[in-house]
């Protein structure tokens, strides 16, 4: 069912420092910061030959990554995103198998303008999983 690894998202306390680390120290192609007010984050996209890395920093009050950064003050891997062909079919199959879909279960438009869903980390070995309809 799942296809390519679309991205790995890393929560960072300081977006400029995180972007500089990837641009200068690791020599990667790093985008300008992009505010995602609907998701409570500002994102920097890092393009690698085979996938992407996204650096996430909190934006506004009640950011969904604020609690994560409290527990992991220097940052950490926040989620991994797999591509699926049909996100609703994937959701239904996962729910049938007992996996929990976060939120109201309806796909939302993610940072790439495509429908996404998140799956409960307790059902996936402690990893928050994002599905994106590619
Ligand atoms: Co993501």
Image (spheres, helix red, strand yellow):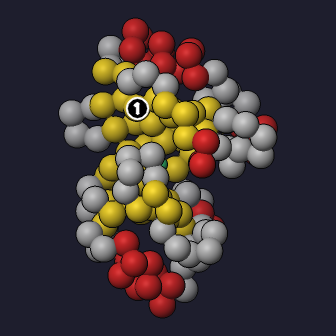
Residue extending farthest to the top is: 24
Left or right: residue 16 versus residue 29 is right
Which residue is located at x 38 percent, y 47 percent?
112
Residue 39 place in picture, x, y as percent: 60, 48
Residue 99 place in picture, x, y as percent: 54, 79
* Quadrant in which the C terminus is drawn: bottom left
Left or right: residue 28 versus residue 78 is left
Residue extending farthest to the bottom is: 96
Which of these two is toward me, 44 or 48?
44
Residue 8 place in picture, x, y as percent: 43, 43
Judge whether residue 19 can be spotted in this image.
Answer: yes
Residue 86 place in picture, x, y as percent: 30, 74
Q: Which of the 4 image quadrants contains residue 98?
A: bottom right
Which residue is located at x 60 percent, y 49 percent?
38
- Up the image or down, 62 lies above or below 22; here it is below
* SS at badge 1: strand
Task: Identify residue for label 1.
Answer: 45
Which of these two is toward me, 125 or 33?
33
- Up the image or down, 5 lies above or below 70; here it is below
Residue extending farthest to the left is: 49
Judge whether residue 125 can be spotted in this image.
Answer: no
Q: Count numbered badges in the picture.
A: 1
* Quadrant in which the N terminus is drawn: bottom left
Crowd rating for badge 1 (residues with CA inside 10 Å; few <14, some 14–19, many 20+): many
Which residue is located at x 46 percent, y 52 percent?
110
Which residue is located at x 31 percent, y 21 percent?
29
Q: Is mark 1 within 8 Å of ligand 1?
A: no
- Up the image or down, 25 lies above or below 132; here it is above
- Up the image or down, 121 lies above or below 16; here it is below
Left or right: residue 50 versus residue 125 is left
């Amino acid at each position: 069912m799942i296809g390519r690894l679309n991205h790995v998202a890393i929560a960072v306390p300081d977006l400029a420092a995180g972007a500089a680390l990837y641009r200068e120290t690791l020599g990667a192609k790093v985008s300008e910061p992009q505010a995602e007010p609907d998701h409570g984050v500002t994102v920097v996209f890092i393009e690698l030959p085979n996938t992407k890395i996204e650096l996430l920093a909190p934006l506004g009050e009640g950011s969904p990554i604020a609690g994560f950064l409290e527990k992991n003050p220097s940052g950490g891997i926040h989620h991994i995103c797999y591509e699926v062909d049909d996100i609703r079919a994937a959701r239904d199959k996962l729910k049938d198998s007992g996996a929990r879909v976060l939120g109201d279960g309806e796909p939302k438009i993610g940072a790439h303008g495509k429908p996404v869903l998140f799956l409960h980390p307790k059902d996936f070995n402690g990893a928050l999983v994002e599905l994106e309809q590619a």
